[in-house]
Amino acid sequence: MAGILLACLPIVGNAWAQSVTFGYTGAAQTLRIAITGTYQITVAGAQGGNGGNSRQGGAGAVIVGDYDFSAGEVLNLIAGGAGSSSTYGGGGGGGGSFVFDQSSNTLVVVAGGGGGAGSNRGGGGGGQVTTSGASGSGAGAGAGGSNGDGGAANPYDHGGGGGGFLTAGQNSGSFATGGAAYPSLAGGVARYGEAGGYGGGGAGTTEGGGGGGYSGGGGGSGYLSFGGGGGGSYEASGFTLISATAGSSGNAISVAGNFGNGYISFLLSQSNISGQGGQLSDVGSSLTTEFDGGSLTSDANATTAASFTITGKGGTLNAAGHTLIFTGVFSNANGSTPGHLIISSNPSAGGVIVLDPVGANTFTGGIQVLAGATLQIASASALGSGTLALLGTATMPAELSVTGTTAITDPIVLEGDPTFDIASGKTTTIGSVISNATPGSPAGDLVKQGGGALVLTGANTYTGATTIDAGTLALSGTGGIVDSAAVTNNATFDLSGSRQSVRLSGDYTQSGSGLLVLGATPTMTIGTGYSQLLASGRATLSGALGIDLGSGTYAIGGKYDLIHASGGVSGTFSQVGYAGSFGPYILPSVVYQPDDVYLELSPQPVLVDSGRAYVASRFAINEALFDDIDAILGGDSAGSARSGVWMHALGNFGSANGFDFRTGGTLVGRGFPISPVWIAGFAVNALFTGTSGRYGTVNNTETGIALYGIYHHRHLQISFSNAVGGLSDNFERSVPEFGIGARAGGAGLYDVAAMRAQYALRQGLFFLAPDIEAAYAHTQIGTVVETGVGSLGLTYEALATDLGRISAGITGGMVLRRSFGTVEPFVSTGGYGSVGQCRYSNVETLQLSSSVQTATVAATAAYTEGAGVKVIGTGHWRAEAYWEGAWGDNSSMQDLGLAVRYVW
């Protein structure tokens, strides 16, 4: 294909020429644009008619400029006619030339016609390059029109005004009419003079008529037979003006503008190829639409609807830095083996080849895109069939640009640094394998650009780096890039469509603008339940993490290993988002480890914190047991001893661990004097405790038996006791915001032992009794499981507490003799310290999640005060009532006691 094929313009009748000119015909002409492109338009207005005495009409204006048209647009063309000339009288005004786009209802360009000459005093005025028409010459002449209006005329025996685009020229009485407005634009007629030219020229009498144009020229003055004024010109918005030449006046020394009839010419300046092409050069054997090893090159942007065939020798489309659009079909040449199509361009200037066939390209030899060139398609149907090779270099990419949503199934090979540019809002899915071009060639990189999505579903084997600069690169199904040397994510890397471990042979690096999207389901199995990024190198993290959630019920305590990097993990995601919901009970968090990044599904804090009352209830239980053993030991006032039948009622309330508690119960015992100084006895008890807070109440009961002994000699009393029994728990937990109402019950044992020494000093009515005590309490209860709340029930690990307590105090009072017996009011003060498990941590389990709840089960130290009164009757009965308070470790207790005994 040798030689040069120049820019071609298709016109009505399917004639072809380098440029086309529409001359005066006396009627409107039609042009249908067949090729989209930029057209250079030359529009010339017609000359005004000559007058008597060798007076010349004014020349028409000439306007030259560029304007863009699209294929299919229809233009209405008015080539102005020259005004009629007269041997003795005045000439008619010249017609303007008009280009009107009927498809868009746009006036594109107008060149004004010249004014007709008068018969005596001078030639007509020339066509104007401004939008206003010129006024006629002489006193009383008509004024030129403006803003698209026709020119004026003197009503008495003067030249008619030139027609404007919007309104006609003014008539001069009944002697001469003005030119018509668009779309008629007929020339004016005269009773005794000359007609105006087609295109709105005004008629002449003995005076010249005004020229037609965007605004008409004024008619000439009739007093001394002057010439008419020239019509105005116009250029639309978007019309790029190259030159504008005003027509010279008739009989001027220097002449300019157009003489004779007007005309309109078109030249496809920035060509669009259509079949033959627009300024295309081809290096081959002959001018044809068959590629037989040749190359088609353009030196301008171009479009063609021509179809091409390709022989086994292939062919090359060379953009040469321009954009070439092919809407025809490329197919295999008849009887030929398939050949490939090469897309090339000037590497330093770039260039785009657009394959956008009406239908589908059917050639089967594949496509090679060379460095510096871009192949643009809207659909994979433009690729024909065969391998798509993107053959860039390390510094110059070969680019595939996709402007529509499509799926590519033919193999793709990469070399150097090729680019996939997917338009915003569009998705390209590649189901075939992307591999290196040839063994030994530079490893093929993959660079993702454009705001759209590139989805890979094949097991790709290219070994170069993967860089995501814009839009989304997604792996779906079994899609992988296991051999890619490294992945750099500056946009979006979406693995949510793949539930497998996506392996990378190198590093993964994500910048602050990057987003990694992973997928998860309730199934916590890598490869089937969620996607994982598995890097052989290092994972360097920044930017955002998004997790796309599948439907179903997620387990509280679930854990997903989202990223594992053998070379270690550095950095963190600045933002984490979730598409979907884990449900109302789960609080997700991302946890970073040296080599891993985990997604952990923790329970909403209130779901487990609401169970803290269970371990906190041990405080009330321990206090009740210590109060119980104290009551058995006796000695609250000087000389007290537990002999005979006795009963002791206990009551206690206070706060600890942020909960309110209460205790109470009754002891009944029998003491036996076994010597003057020794009493031995036993007691049974029934105690209860309650611990309550915002989310529920724990009620406990303690039932047991105790043995005790008391040594009492003169001022000294030593007492000891050991009690054992059973515990039962009943926990009612309520979390209204989640609709939870749960119950739990358990059973266990307790063991309490204590020893006390008291020394009582008496002086008259008064006594003072210091004391010291050592006590030990052990409780245990088995695992407790909530019911009535389904999978949201807590399981409480078995509890076992061991506490030691050392206390000391002093009690003082007086002995008052009365007729019914002795009254002993008393007060006390002291304190105690606890050793052992003063704070206890218990494990709660909710589905797969375990949490530790910690509470104080005994104050490590406390200050005590008390007061009471004992009444010793004259008979066998005894009674005692007292109050004691204790404060320590952010806890407070108020203890009320009542004891009654009968001594035989």
Image (cartoon, rainbow, N blue to C red):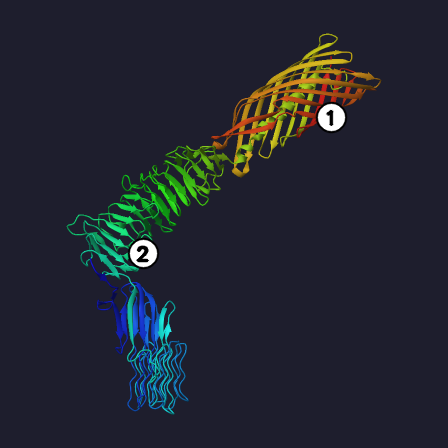
Q: Position of residue 328 (x, y in %)?
A: 24, 56
Horizontal placement of 62 versus 10: left or right?
right
Query: Which of pointers 2 and 1 lies earlier in the amino acid sequence?
Result: 2
Q: Observer-nearest residue: 571 or 176?
A: 571
Q: Going by the picture, which residue comes out furthest to the right?
A: 764
| Res 636 seen here | yes
Count of labels in the image:
2
Q: Observer-nearest residue: 368 or 632?
A: 368
Return the mark for residue 865.
Answer: 1
Residue type, mark 1 in image: Glu
Q: Observer-nearest residue: 380 or 671?
A: 380
Q: Going by the picture, which residue comes out furthest to the top?
A: 675
Return the mark for residue 321.
Answer: 2
Q: Position of residue 152 (x, y in %)?
A: 39, 84
Horizontal placement of 234 versus 357: left or right?
right
Residue 686 lies in quadrant: top right
Q: Observer-nearest residue: 781 or 181?
A: 181
Element type at mark 2: loop
Image quarter where the C terminus lies is top right
Residue type, mark 2 in image: Gly
Q: Position of residue 521 (x, y in %)?
A: 41, 37
Return the mark for residue 120.
Answer: none
Measure the C-alpha gap from mark 2 to mark 1. 99 Å
User: Crowding at label 2, few (<14), some or many (≥20) Cα neighbours within 10 Å?
Assistant: many
Q: Is residue 226 above or below residue 674?
A: below
| Res 547 seen here | no
Residue 627 lies in quadrant: top right
Q: Position of residue 71 (x, y in %)?
A: 29, 63
Q: Is residue 351 above or below residue 737?
A: below
Residue 611 lies in quadrant: top right
- Comparing labels 2 and 1, the label whose residue is closer to the camera: 2
